[in-house]
């Protein structure tokens, strides 16, 4: 499993560094040499090593330079195992960057196991895992690295990689008791084939909404499809089986303020996380995504969502209310934020660096407000609607 994580990450980084580079099919043998066999140069190796060190937190284990001068995948796997032996409390996943610059998302390993323990109850009786997703992203890590351990007691379920096969090849591979882990586009292709699944085969879909017509077509073929709602920032939040049905929260989540969700944190604290979607709640446990939050604006050529940024900022305990907008033309080309502090939260000069650090830890550079203004209430026009403001005019 560690070989697949390391190999998938290295392949993704090498492909990112040089688009169009021809790479062998995954999973890779540990004998592969990233330099001699794949032509990776020193910059390619540095980028891949940095990404692996970030994912597994090499620095926390005192192994920052463990990969220098070692281009063989076997050496990287050994280093990864040694790093985890020294520190395995948390992992840092990155978003795909499909909506902008990739974002770092830190998760405790204990928190990931908490989700996997619940997934094992939702998906009992699995004998194998067939995967069409990479193991170094959080979805693949949960379902192809941790879940195979949770479902098999003292053993580990075997994992078969489907990425070197076409969706049509699934018919010749799937067996009763299999769990097939894939993304909606892959499932769409399977549904178009009209495959008939053996008894007791379960599929999982995540990373994006699975169209209801796709889910129904797969169910007509005998597949039990479990859809998981979540993100790289939150991991899994809820799950459902039937197309169009509400998602059910995992037991440790609950609906939070400002449209987000919250869960118990360390030391009796509550951890609040924003979501990229609006949620319609049918009760305290069930919800349906109701579309992306607000419309995007362009910052440095990247789509960002001011309402999502506002929700992240509003989660800081010093913030009573806030508003986020794109700067006026004469002010610049970044986002700006107006903040109403909680009484007793301190002066604006003291709050600005605190809020800067808060958003820097949770948002990509294009999403981070470049200017903060402060006042006793949000600026509004004569009709009471929220209004624009001139930077610093209300401080």
Image: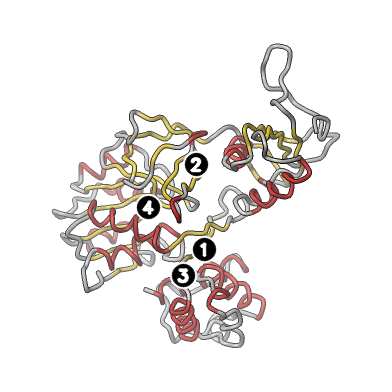
Contact (Cβ within 8 Å) of mark 4 with mark 2: no
Q: Quadrant of the C terminus?
A: top right
Q: CA distance from mark 2 to mark 3?
A: 27 Å
Location of residue 328 in the rendering, given as x and y in whole percent from the top left corner: 80, 32
The mark lying in front, picked from 3 and 1, is 1
The mark lying in front, picked from 1 and 4, is 1
Instruction: Determine which quarter of the picture holds residue 327.
Output: top right
The coloring applied to the image is: secondary structure
Task: Say which mark, if any, is on residue 44.
Answer: none
Secondary structure beneath label 1: strand
Secondary structure beneath label 4: helix
Question: Which callout, 3 or 4, points at the residue further toward the start of the chain?
Answer: 3
Secondary structure beneath label 3: helix
In the picture shown, does residue 204 fall above or below 25?
Answer: above
Circle 4 sits on which residue?
186
Location of residue 59 in the rendering, given as x and y in whole percent from the top left corner: 58, 75
Q: Nearer the viewer, residue 125 or 60?
A: 60
Circle 3 sits on which residue?
8
The mark lying in front, picked from 4 and 2, is 2
Question: Which callout, 2 or 3, points at the residue further toward the start of the chain?
Answer: 3
Location of residue 326 in the rendering, given as x and y in whole percent from the top left corner: 72, 35
Task: Say which mark, if any, is on residue 92.
Answer: 1
The extreme front residue here reads: 344
Task: Say which mark, if any, is on residue 275.
Answer: 2
Q: CA distance from mark 4 to mark 2?
A: 25 Å
């Amino acid at each position: 499993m560690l070989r697949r994580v390391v190999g998938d990450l290295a392949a993704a980084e090498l492909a990112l560094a040089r688009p169009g580079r021809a790479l062998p099919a995954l999973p890779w043998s540990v004998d592969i040499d990233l330099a001699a066999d794949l032509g990776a140069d020193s910059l390619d190796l540095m980028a891949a090593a940095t990404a692996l060190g970030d994912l597994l937190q090499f620095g926390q284990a005192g192994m920052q330079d463990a990969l220098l001068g070692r281009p063989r995948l076997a050496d990287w796997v050994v280093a990864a195992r040694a790093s985890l032996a020294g520190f395995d409390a948390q992992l840092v996943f990155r978003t795909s960057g499909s909506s902008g610059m990739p974002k770092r998302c830190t998760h405790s390993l204990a928190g990931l196991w908490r989700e996997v323990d619940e997934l094992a109850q939702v998906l009992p009786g699995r004998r194998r895992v067939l995967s069409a997703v990479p193991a170094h992203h959080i979805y693949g890590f949960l379902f192809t690295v941790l879940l195979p351990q949770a479902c098999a007691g003292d053993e580990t379920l075997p994992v078969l990689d489907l990425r070197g096969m076409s969706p049509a090849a699934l018919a010749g591979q799937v067996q009763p008791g299999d769990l097939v882990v894939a993304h909606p586009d892959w499932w769409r292709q399977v549904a178009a084939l009209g495959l008939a699944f053996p008894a007791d085969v379960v599929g999982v879909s995540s990373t994006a909404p699975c169209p209801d017509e796709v889910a129904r077509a797969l169910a007509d073929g005998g597949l039990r499809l479990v859809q998981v709602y979540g993100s790289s920032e939150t991991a899994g939040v809820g799950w459902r089986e039937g197309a169009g049905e509400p998602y059910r929260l995992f037991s440790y989540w609950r609906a939070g303020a400002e449209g987000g969700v919250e869960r118990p944190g360390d030391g009796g604290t509550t951890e609040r996380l924003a979501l990229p979607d609006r949620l319609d709640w049918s009760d305290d446990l069930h919800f349906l995504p109701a579309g992306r939050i607000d419309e995007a604006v362009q910052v440095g050529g990247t789509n960002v969502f001011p309402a999502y940024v506002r929700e992240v900022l509003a989660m800081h305990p010093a913030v009573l209310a806030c508003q986020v907008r794109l700067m006026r033309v004469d002010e610049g080309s970044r986002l700006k934020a107006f903040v109403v502090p909680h009484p007793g939260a301190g002066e604006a000069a003291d709050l600005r660096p605190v809020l800067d650090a808060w958003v820097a830890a949770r948002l990509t550079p294009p999403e981070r407000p470049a200017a903060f203004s402060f006042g006793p209430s949000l600026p509004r026009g004569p009709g009471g609607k929220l209004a624009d403001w001139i930077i610093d005019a209300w401080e």
